[in-house]
Amino acid sequence: MADYPLIAEHGLIGDLQTAALIATDGTVDWFCAPRFDSPSVFGSILDADSGGYFRIYPSRAHSRAKQLYVPDTAVLVTRFLTEEGVGEIVDFMPISGAVATDRHQLVRLVRCVRGSITFDVEVAPRFDYGRAEHRTTLTDDGAVFESDDYAITVHLVREPDDERLARTWVDDGGDVRAEVTLRAGDLRGVILETGAAGPIRQVRVAEARRLLDDTIHYWTTWLDRSTYTGRWREAVERSAITLKLMTYAPTGGLVAAPTAALPEQIGGERNWDYRYTWVRDSAFSVYALLGLGFTEEAADLGRWLAERVDEQADTKGAGPLQIMYRVDGTSDLVEETLEHWEGYRGSAPVRIGNGAAGQLQLDIYGEAMDSLWFADRHGATTGHQGWRKISDLLGWLADNWDQPEEGIWETRGGRQDFTYGRLMSWVALDRGIRLATEHGRPAPLPRWLRERDAIYDQIMQRGWSPARQAFRQHYRTDVLDSSLLRMSSCGFIAPTDPMWLSTLDAMAGELVTDSLVYRYDPAASPDGLRGGEGTFSLCTFNYVEALARSGRLNEARLTFAKMLTYANHLGLYSEEIALTGEQLGNFPQAFTHLALINSALVLDDALNRA
């Protein structure tokens, strides 16, 4: 376990087509290319021995590391404090733009700030999740690593008279190692370029500085478009940058996380691949982005959602929408296990692909329709062809909402009549009715109204537990489920309705532990998987929003403040929080960061009105 840094001990950089995790010890231990969902080049976070890595670190064993972002950017700085001096690594990826490409650059600049410092450099790629061998070519100006199907080139950032500063060699495993000594004011580095086997070239320091300046300018200019002026600007804007980093610019799709198979429980089997675009995440992101004034990004996500609605894909009985897609919009997500990798701290299996893609999850229709309706209110009106597809989708839902499903949490313990799926089916039909009425669109309104009201009555009759005085997870249990925290925010029930306030109290007693919120109790409601899990960070922020809407502002504000303390040193969140406060699951998670933004917006508004 000592070979694995904590999940929280990482920063994220990216170029809007892929991303890299960089640990506080200077190691790139997760990087896939050319896209988020491509095979890994470096993957030691999932197997320290055979995953591959790119490490730059002080030669001296005793050093202290600090990590920060250049303010208002995704440029990561890792600082090392040693007895001989202070050095730092500046990591970033120049923006690739909206045209898909195999060519990406990962820039690592090394600088001595005070005194003198010697850095060791190790470049050890393991292509295709460590399944492909590679060949190495080394020159005075860099190296090429080449497998049968992929290649990367490493260019040295140096000046012509730099031979005295470094020595470089290839070890027996075909990995490149180097040692460089810098004095105060010196800046050198390497540029890793994907998708090409050379030509290797010497990069002058001035050129590398221009790449850095251009990348800083991109991020600061982008963030200047934010309209947020509330109480939690630093946390909200860091979350916005993080969401932007997880956006695949060519399609506008947002990955749930840039990582795969990081465990929800150390040693457990809940290790999923999140490098895909969920309909649900994209829908929720529209609210967050529009709430901050990022209308272009919200429009891109809206178009991505509209394209999936237009496709009406064949999902083998699971409805016209698949719950998730690849970043390019395709739907091939076959799940497989990497048997040769041990997993993070021994947490196997390591899964790539996602077998939940074919599940029936009725809630996605409500989330998609709610975001399209929300976008419509902000001026993004659906055209005629798009409306016809929406009408077809709602026609399918009107016929199929009253059936068991796998539910929002993608359980593998069999289908149930999940209350949240019914709730969001109600939302889908309600928003369709509103759009048709407001814009005078043709629609079978009597049928939609009838089905919407039938869902409402069913939830009130079967989704309510008289014994618990709360809305329940599904109709065959009295277990509670924090997905239902959205009942008031989507307009199904008034936030001060006694039934809703009673539900909040019941959740506080069963699912909340000192502000942190569990999704549900898997021991009381088996989900088909062994082991347990931590509290779910998304649910904690949804709890804040629910409290704020219900007028419990002091409780909401304290819960929000406590949750901010669970962020890592850079303001990033994974999927879950363990009993020890350790971050667990894929990292960083889009769902958590967009929920942070939405809860901050709601809480700010409630506090201002109060």
Image (cartoon, grey):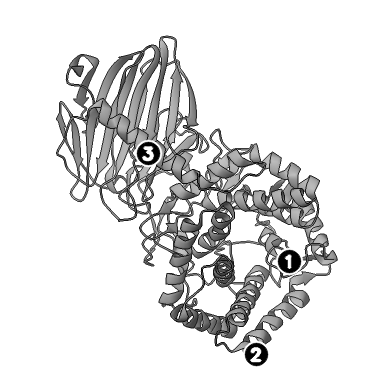
- Point out residue 383 in the picture as x, y percentages from the top left corner: 47, 77
Q: Secondary structure at mark 2?
A: helix
Among numbered discs 2 and 3, the one appearing first in the sequence: 3
Q: Which residue shows up at 69% across the image and 66% down it?
A: 473
Residue for badge 2: 446
Front residue of 489 and 23:
489
Disc 1 residue crowd, few under 14, some 14–19, many 20+, Cα 10 Å: many
Which of pointers 3 and 1 indicates the residue nearer the eye? 3
Which of pointers 1 and 2 indicates the residue nearer the eye? 2
Residue 472 disc label: 1
- Point out residue 414 in the picture as x, y percentages from the top left corner: 57, 69
Among numbered discs 1 and 2, the one appearing first in the sequence: 2
Q: Residue flagged by tag 3: what amino acid is it?
A: Thr
Residue 436's place in the image compared with 584, above or below, is below
Disc 2 residue crowd, few under 14, some 14–19, many 20+, Cα 10 Å: few
C-alpha gap between disc 2 and disc 3: 54 Å
| Horizontal relation, residue 62 to residue 507: left or right | left
Q: Residue flagged by tag 1: what amino acid is it?
A: Arg
Q: Secondary structure at mark 3?
A: helix
Front residue of 283 and 276:
283
Residue 555's place in the image compared with 286, above or below, is above
Q: Residue flagged by tag 2: what amino acid is it?
A: Pro
Front residue of 477 and 127:
127
Residue for badge 3: 215
